[in-house]
Amino acid sequence: MRHITMIAIVTMLATTALAARAKTMNVQVREAQVRQAPGFLSRILISVPYTEPVTVLEEKEDWMRVQTGSTEGWMHHTALTTKRLKLSGAGPDAQTTVSSDEQALAGKGFNSDVEKQFKERNAKVDFAVVDKMEKLKIPVAEIQAFLKKGDVVPVEGGAK
Amino acid sequence: MITERIILPTILVLAAVFTGCKSLEVVTKVTTTVGVATGTISAEQAQSIDRSATAVGKAFEKLTPEQEYYIGRSVAATILVDYKPFDHAAATRYINTLGMALALSSDKPETFGGWHFLIMDTDEINAFAAPGGFILLSRGMLHCCRSEDELAAVLAHEIGHVQREHGLRAINSSRWTSAFTILGTEAAKNLGGQQLAEMTTVFEGSISDVTSTLANSGYARKLEREADADAVVILQRVGYNPTGLINMLGEMSRRLEKDTRGFAKTHPDPQDRIKDLKKLIGTVTPEAEHPARQARFNTALGGI
């Protein structure tokens, strides 16, 4: 009887531990959006910055229902990672990363410091054009209207 | 002369082996300050490409989206030394809107810095997919597209290259060995002066590897097939006819015949890709007429 109780307790603890570990993921893009429903055309509730942890409540195909602060909503799985990413305090580009076997290059390898030195060594390389390229952001509502106006209708299931 | 005798057969062998779109499309004149492009393909580069094409390892998979982003920025900036951007706000907004619609239906809608599309001001038929979602298309490439569905096909193909991280595979495995060695000497902190300098050298080498592959040699045929297959899936998810890719390749094939610059004469015909695509798509339905779609395509890109 005691053995059975012990096994039950150990199993319960192990399950709890696994579940707890699986529940937290970190934002691996500069800024990720939490949406009201699974789909990019859904309303944005909140934006979550790089490295911020979120609690995963549910998974549905490519989408995860997450909690961050008091907000619950959906994030695309490609915005999240189980890898630990940690800021040193001076913003996303100055982060250090907890190194681990599966993530030897993360954070420390190629970052803004390296890019800065690369620029110094290669004065002709034109980052201003790339900066300008990055500034153009098309709102989702505009994309949605674009598809509608062009009569672009999904063949199989539509936008993910 | 002796060198030329060695290089020319190498190019021909490469053309036969690496029948990717970059081999087809790229005119090799990217001369960069990082010593990337040489205007031709050396035997050493050929070996490097060979190694990368046969997948030297999967170290690139350890990269975070942030690092992929920094590689992509520098690759794009390096290419844009030789290819100036085409300053046309309406056309740029149009390809970004279409590109975003496609990227959101890809398997990698979220990248560190988002997806971005730029038109290069050249008649050369050319397209580059830099890691992280920086896609560059030439006016010459846009001229191969006669409808929005065909343009969508070009963009979806390039998105395919990015989502499969094909650019990162071009990075020589020796870079990873160097990077791990540098990182191994240092605890979990920011890199210091000497290490930062060494890491920048590794970074420079990596940018050179990727840019050289994009600009000079092209991807292995297998990777081009993957990007074409991805394009078909993405187009169908959004609602464009994948026949657009076949039609665009047909037009590209015709235009390449007339284009005597660079390697255009020796590049394999896009007809091979068309054959593969026909097998992949199965029933090829002609592009339907969509007046509103065609009108905005003509308005945005008609004058370029």
Image (spheres, coloured by chain):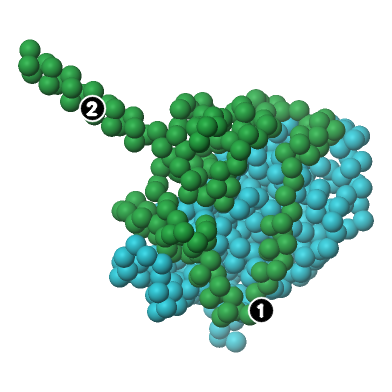
Which secondary structure, mark 1? Answer: loop
User: From the viewer's perspective, is A69 left or right of B88?
Assistant: left
Task: Say whether disc 2 or disc 1 marks the residue closer to the N-terminus.
Answer: 2
Q: Is residue A61 above or below residue B77?
A: above
Asked where in the image residue B197 lies, by quadrant, the reply is bottom left
- Chain A colour in the picture: green
Which secondary structure, mark 2? Answer: helix
Taking the spot 41% from the left edge, 67% from the top edge, the residue there is B190
The cyan-coloured chain is labelled B
The kind of residue tagged 1 is Lys
* Label drawn at residue A124: 1
Q: How many C-alpha atoms fall within 10 Å of the one at disc 2: few (<14), some, or many (≥20)?
A: few
Residue B249, can we see it?
A: no
Q: How many C-alpha atoms fall within 10 Å of the one at disc 1: few (<14), some, or many (≥20)?
A: some
* Label drawn at residue B193: none
User: From the viewer's perspective, is B55 left or right of B25?
Assistant: left
Taking the spot 76% from the left edge, 69% from the top edge, the residue there is B84
* Label drawn at residue A13: 2
The residue closer to the viewer here, B175 or B265, is: B175
Q: Position of residue A100 (x, y in %)?
A: 32, 54
